[in-house]
Structure formats: C-alpha cells, structure tokens
Image (cartoon, helix red, strand yellow):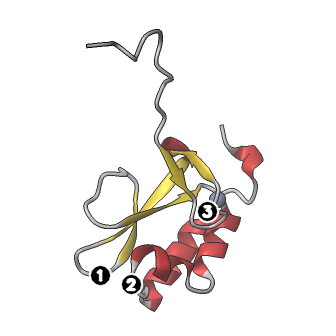
Amino acid sequence: MTTTHQGPRPRHVPQRTCIGCRQAEGKRALIRIVRTPEERITVDPTGKANGRGAYLHAQRPCWEKALKGGTMRNALKITPVREDVEALRAFAMALPAEESELA
Ligand SMILES: [Zn+2]
C-alpha cells in the first residue's frame, strides 16, 4: 500500500460557471438562482435551496446577458414566467454595473 498524497494538498475552492459571462468563479463570489418545485425561478441568497440552480456574478451585465435569449432556460430547463424575469431584472438593477465594486 503506497501513499500518493504526500505534502500539502491544494486547497479546494468549489468553482461554478456564471451563466452570463461563462467564466468560472469561486462559488462564494457568485449569486445562486434556483428553480423551485413550483417551476419558478428565484434568487437563492443562502445558496442552499433545493432544486436545479445556476450561478451569476453579482454584476448587472451578467444578469442582463442571462435574461436575454435562452440562457436561463437552458441552465434551469424551464422557461421563466414573465413575473420571474421581471423580478430577476429588478434584482439585477440593484447590482453594481462593474466588477470594481466587488470586495
Ligand atoms: Zn459573469
């Protein structure tokens, strides 16, 4: 029996892909949206809600991209209802327009 894991292991940071800009990012830098059992789409501030989720940067441009076309539909496998699109758009409006405001 041999030990192959000697020395410090690289620290594992979970990576998720932003569905807006398609860049992978540490999970904690992203906001999760989730498809609820009622087939609605909502922001998941805890990141722990059950259901199919997708991740987006806390930046308005990523949300705008995701809300256009079929990005959100492809990621969550449902067509968002108009109220949900509007709620997500309203959420996005409160986000910074640029990355520079991130901590
Ligand atoms: Zn992004």
Q: Which residue is mark 2?
A: 78
Q: Distance between the Cα atoms at labels 1 and 2?
A: 7 Å
Between 19 and 85, the residue placed more toward the observer is: 19
Q: Which residue is mark 1?
A: 39
Left/right of residue 95 with respect to residue 46 in the rendered view: right
Q: Amino acid at mark 1?
A: Glu
Q: Secondary structure at mark 1?
A: loop
Q: Which residue is mark 3?
A: 94
| Badge 1 or badge 2: first in the primary sequence | 1
In terms of secondary structure, where does tag 2 sit?
A: loop
Q: Residues within 10 Å of mark 2 (few under 14, many from 20)?
A: some
Quadrant position of the C terminus in the picture: top right
Who is closer to the viewer here, 41 or 75?
75
Q: How many marks?
A: 3
Amino acid type at image mark 2: Ile
Give the percent coordinates (x, y) of residue 14. Answer: 46, 41
Q: Residue at x 56, y 78 (%)?
A: 71
Up-down relation of residue 19 to residue 100 (above or below): below
